[in-house]
Amino acid sequence: MAGDQFLGEPDPEERIVLHVDMDCFYASCERLREPDLEGEPLVVGMGYEAGETVGAVATASYEAREYGVESAQAIGSALENLPRKAENPDDPDAGRYRPVDMDFYQSVAADVKDILHELGDTVREVSIDEAYLDVTERTDWSVAEGFARHVRQRIEREVGVPASVGVAPDMSTAKLASDHDKPEGLVVVPPDDVREFLAPIDIADVHGVGPVRACELREMGIETAGDLADADPYDLVERFGERGRDLHRRARGKDNRAVEPTGKPKSLSRESSFDGPTGDFERVREQARTLAEAVADRATRKDAFYRTIGVKVVTPPYDVNTRAQSLPGPVDEPDLVEEISMDLLAEFEDERVRKVGVRVSNLDFSEREQSSLDGFEGSGADGGHSRQQRGAEADTDTRRDSARTRTRNHDGQSSLGEFE
Ligand code: TTP
Ligand code: MG
């Protein structure tokens, strides 16, 4: 119907939107640095220590959800459903509890987002563990499933946390698709299947339907997205105004919102694992050198200048150590990335190393914008020199990251946030 689309808006059937949502994200992060928690009922939250009473669950692993523990639940209820192992060591139905460590989760999320920015044409980050990617130019409906699997595998392999992925011709359906088979879900809904996929979805799960509106819709006899799609749009507009028209569109897979990017990548990084922990430091250095080169090359290709260069060294069992050095101004200097990485790495010479990574951050893209405005597009062509150090006035784009700079955590693990 012509009324569904407006002149100049992209035809939703021509778009391929991928939605990624990490599985029980904070719990997965805890498992990353404490692999013994794998497979255990695990609750991340606040207020469970002896003497504490106030607090809530941030998230629960899928094993803990089996016991009725869920996000936003009062900690007292969670403890009733799932007692704490630390206090009930012999109870087979007890679970593990861990405090919230936002710095660590932000650092893991940054690693995931780096990958997503590499894989999507445009990326819209909507929360710490969730993003939409427009991948229209990267894939095709006939191979979209393979592409989605690739996205999930790269996150799993390079960062080590599980994700669920949904692919659909619009954002709203893609989000429902990623949620459909959690955890480790992978659901592709090609254009011709959208109506069928949406039909049985509960009305409360349709994007934009809150609990109040869900009740009102149920009063109208509308229980599912299928019912909503079949409803008379005029009744919906009468009841909910323009919002009613949006809901009707969404229920029919006609969510015309484009994936608007939420910003440029905040950092660029590469890391790689060894087969097992290695004591051969020359091998670690060699690997880091290759990674430094790859990261610097990516920054150059993306027209990104960086002000901070850092390394990450994971030592057994899974201690994530990060070190970073900030420069007085943004640069594009591959040699400096290598040199500083080597300096920062030296401290770990006597350690066994499981994984090594190099990151550039405090990114600044302002010259690219400026140069295209000024018609200076070719100014980087004579190599790194004209792109080297710039004045303080070019520094404004880095402010987004400055609040995140952090120091070592109390447990001796240095936060990856230092990288950002
Ligand atoms: P979600 O993606 O909603 O939840 P999740 O990743 O834990 O689980 P799922 O597998 O269902 O996606 O939220 C992401 C993180 O945000 C979550 O790990 C913890 C945090 N969070 C809270 O702190 N409080 C809350 O009420 C919710 C819903 C999430
Ligand atoms: Mg999630």
Image (cartoon, grey):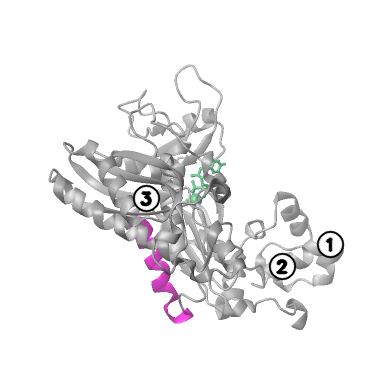
Say which of marks 3 and 2 sits in front: 3
The stretch of residues the image draws in magenta is: 140-156
Asked if 1 appears above or below 273 in the picture, the reply is below
At 38% across and 26% down in the image, what residue appears?
410
Q: According to the image, label 1 marks what residue?
A: 241
Residue type at mark 1 is Gly
Does any portion of residue 217 appear in the rendered image? yes
Q: Find the distance from the CA under tag 2 to the CA under tag 1.
A: 15 Å
At 40% across and 38% down in the image, what residue appears?
42
Q: According to the image, label 3 marks what residue?
A: 359
Q: Which circle marks residue 414 in the picture?
A: none
Say which of marks 2 and 1 sits in front: 1
Q: Are marks 1 and 3 in contact (CB under 8 Å)?
A: no
Q: According to the image, label 2 marks what residue?
A: 228
Q: Residue 276 in the image: x percent, y percent?
A: 17, 48
Q: Residue 22 in the image: x percent, y percent?
A: 46, 53
Q: Nearer the viewer, residue 355 or 33?
A: 355
Residue at disc 2, secondary structure = helix
Category of crowding for the residue at label 3, using alpha-carbon neighbours closer than 10 angstroms: few (below 14), some (14–19), many (at least 20): many
Say which of marks 1 and 3 sits in front: 3
Q: Nearer the viewer, residue 111 or 88?
A: 111
